[in-house]
Amino acid sequence: MTKHPYLWKHHLFSSCSKIMMRFSYGFEMSSRWRCLGTEPKKVEYYPPTLPSVFFASLTSKSYCSVLNNPGYDRNCQLRGALPECMLACCSTKDSSLISVPAPDGHYCRGNMVCLGGKCETKEPAKKPR
């Protein structure tokens, strides 16, 4: 076990790793290394949900404004059809249109959902092994 005060007792870093961490975080930031020696806090459990559920819960911001910037909104006049699993985002300033991938879980073809940009069959979540 290491006797270094800034490393957890059960973690062993190579000398190369220690040098690279010091180089990356700076020698003057040694006070921030103390976090490596603290006990981790309890991990909060959140039920697994798809990103579309999160974005649907946003009331003051749309998916487009979160994904791009506050100058875009999903409420726009669209001429023609967009490819499947894509959303239209319009600029609030000049009404220019951009298309962005729909978040995973966005409904397509009725009861199917977008996953990784493709319309897939919705299946119940599986428990981790």
Image (cartoon, helix red, strand yellow):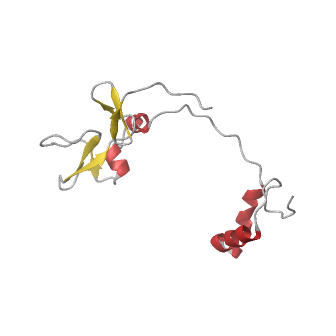
Question: Residue 126 or 36: which is nearer the viewer?
Answer: 126
Counting from the top left corner in percent of width and height, residue 29 is at 69, 70
Q: In this view, does 90 lie to the left or right of 28?
A: left
Front residue of 83 and 95: 83
Going by the image, does 18 lie left or right of 44? right
For residue 23, which quarter of the picture? bottom right
Q: Please tell me which residue lies in front, 35 or 114.
A: 114
- Closest to the observer, 71 or 116: 116
Residue at 19% x, 43% y is 76
Picture layout, residue 14 above or below residue 89: below
Return the x and y of residue 84 as percentages of the image width and height: 26, 38
The reply to whether residue 123 is in sight is yes
Q: Please tell me how many numbered marks the rendered image carries.
A: 0
Q: Is residue 101 left or right of residue 22?
A: left
Q: Where is residue 36 in the image (x, y as percent from the top left)?
A: 74, 58
Residue plotted at (73% across, 57% down): 35
Q: Residue 37, position in %: x, y?
A: 78, 57
The N terminus: image quadrant: bottom right
Tell me which corner region of the image, top left, top right, bottom left or bottom right, holds residue 2.
bottom right
As drawn, 128 above or below 91: above
| Residue located at (62% from left, 32% from top) | 129
